[in-house]
Amino acid sequence: MRLSVDHVTRYVYDRPARSVVQSHRLQPSEFEGQKLLHWQVTVSGGSKGAVYRDGAGDLVQGWTVAGPVSEVTVRVEGSVETKDFSGVLRGHRETVPPEAYLRATTPTRADTALQALASSVAGSDSLALAHALREAVADAIAYRPGATHAHTTAAEALALGEGVCQDHAHALIAVARVRGLPGRYVSGYLFADADGAAHEAAHAWAELHLPGLGWVGFDPANRCCPDARYIRLGSGFDSQDAAPIRGIARGGGSEAMDVTVAIMNQNQ
């Protein structure tokens, strides 16, 4: 598929900020299932800083906006050619060993309930186990927008029984680690077609590292593995670590954020 992205994030400060500094993971890496055709990130009033590729293979770009500033708009425009490899991440260059992703973080720490959920699942091999864990998480946490917030943990979402894609990804990472499978959080985009399923254009899922296959994506929110409808932006230990935009405003009081994302299929 050829997918186009128009992603706008707008920050508004109730008092002008002295300056705004941001770190972006907003440019997708290339691998066998994903090729960049065009990609541009702009920041209103922004100056580019250092850029580097981290150990997970993600491009990180720094930006600075000199103040006083009351509003900052970050816009991503691009197009990507994607292929379906059933979630298997092929040809992605990275240097962090998979075992590093066995470490739990606050959002992905497994409490007694998550440990019990992980132990209740059976699989004839690691791939079957991973699929079964994905379904167990999807069954245990119903998809409901607005049910949770940005800092909800996997344990809290499981106790609530509701959540969004972020909660599904955190929970799958938690139960996978209980069963000895390295897991990481992936941020990206999803083309919402007309199949009637619940979708979010700005999306998140998990990748589990399986013997013989390497990293494989699993999306409990949609009960599938990422296919050609998905654009992979970057990964991390959890949603905070893999956030596409991280930053700080010096001064400026409280901050309000508005996000709009449109994904189009250029083949149609």
Image (cartoon, rainbow, N blue to C red):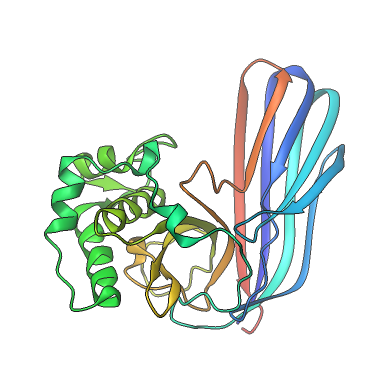
Kindly identify the residue that appears in the image at 40 percent across and 47 percent down: 103
- Write down the quadrant of residue 123 in the picture: bottom left
Viewer-proximal residue among 145 and 247: 247
Question: In x, y percent, where is residue 118?
Answer: 19, 56
Question: In x, y percent, where is residue 207?
Answer: 43, 64
Q: Is residue 213 left or right of residue 8?
A: left
Question: In x, y percent, where is residue 78?
Answer: 73, 65
Viewer-proximal residue among 49 and 42: 49
Residue 221, placed above or below residue 215: above
Residue 191, placed above or below residue 111: below
Question: In x, y percent, where is residue 167?
Answer: 35, 48
Kindly identify the residue that appears in the image at 18 percent across and 78 percent down: 124
Residue 18, placed above or below residue 20: above
Decide if residue 231 is in sight here: yes
Kindly identify the residue that appears in the image at 35 percent across and 44 percent down: 108
Q: Is residue 140 left or right of residue 143?
A: left
Query: Which quadrant of the rendered structure holds the N terminus?
Result: bottom right
Query: Which quadrant of the rendered structure holds the C terminus?
Result: bottom right
Q: Total marks drawn?
A: 0
Decide if residue 202 is in sight here: no
Viewer-proximal residue among 110 and 76: 110
Q: In this view, does 121 lie to the left or right of 238?
A: left
Kindly identify the residue that appears in the image at 31 percent across and 55 percent down: 177
